[in-house]
Amino acid sequence: MNAVTTMQGHAPAIQITSFNELMRFAEMASQSGMVPSQYNGKPGAVLIAVQMGSELGLAPMQSLQNIAVINGRPSVWGDALLGLVKASPVCDDVIETTDGEGDQMTAICVAKRKGKSPVEARFSVQDAKDAGLWNKQGPWKQYSRRMLQMRARGFALRDAFPDVLRGLITAEEAADIPQDEFRNSVSNQRPVDVTPQKRELPREERQVNHIEWFKSRLANCSDTGCVLALESNWAKTQKKAAEAGKPISEETLDAVKDLIADRYGELVQQEQQQAEDNAAVDLEEMPA
């Protein structure tokens, strides 16, 4: 069972403590009708979003509500991005202002990191015009001041807190980035089947050693995303084997499941340790 803890001032929150619990949560959430439409019926997408949010310090449901994939790129809504930064122990303050009016308007964001010089980012009406955004149908036309603010915020926070945000951009910014030909070609590719190819041998049928195959592939995984991708494709392999009338044995399924869970746990610990080490270095650099 998942551990349930009561957060200060908040309702009880589910704490996912294992890979199997994460898979069960993803399955339930994707069928619940209580998540954004991009996650409906897609447990794999839920799993990736929750894992990504966990690395950023978001609870499972916060991850699903605040992480969006726009134009093929994971992103976080601007207010959530600001919340992540302000919750970080290395953040001193974030100050946002607007200077000027009309075509002279400029959004300014100053991000202050403890022990570091402030980082300032500006985004003006002229910048928006140069980027082809000004008077663009949608939010830029309806909430132009807010969109200028989101751009300045995104630039300042990414420059001042790259270790906290880990390359994420605001969803507002991602919506304005068109998919290029490379992203289109990648998004249109078919999922890769991880079933090892069988070679026909004379008068005998060659059997695939899934356990040894996974040991080799998992050893080469350097991050949790790689493990999750293998696990997702493994489910497809099991389905194909069953449909072909050659189901994979329970012994093999259990062994592979344990291999995936063990490697995933190792990499989660490594990533968490790396994040803690990065934060410790920043704190050590603070003046006395």
Image: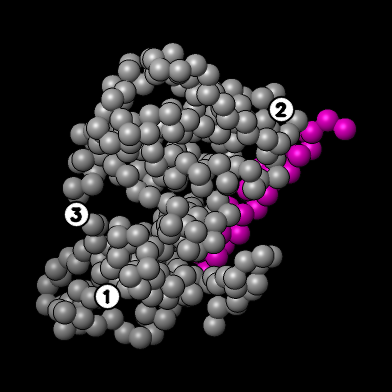
* Residue 11 in sight in this render: yes
Residue type indicated by callout 3: Arg
Choose between 54 and 62: the one closer to the eye: 62
Task: Tell me how far mark 3 sits from mark 2, CA to CA.
Answer: 46 Å
Choose between 238 and 123: the one closer to the eye: 123
Residue type indicated by callout 1: Gln
The disc placed on residue 238 is 1
In the image, which residues are magenta?
261-288
Residue type indicated by callout 2: Lys
Magenta span includes 275: yes
N-terminal-most mark, 1 or 2: 2
The quarter of the rendered structure image containing the C terminus is top right
Question: On screen, 282 above or below 245?
Answer: above
Q: Secondary structure at mark 3?
A: loop
Q: Secondary structure at mark 2?
A: loop
Q: Is residue 77 left or right of residue 176?
A: right
Give me the residue at 26% from left, 70% from top.
Answer: 237
Residue 279 placement (x, y as % from top left): 69, 43
Residue receiving disc 3: 190
Residue receiving disc 2: 116
Give me the residue at 55% from left, 41% from top.
Answer: 82
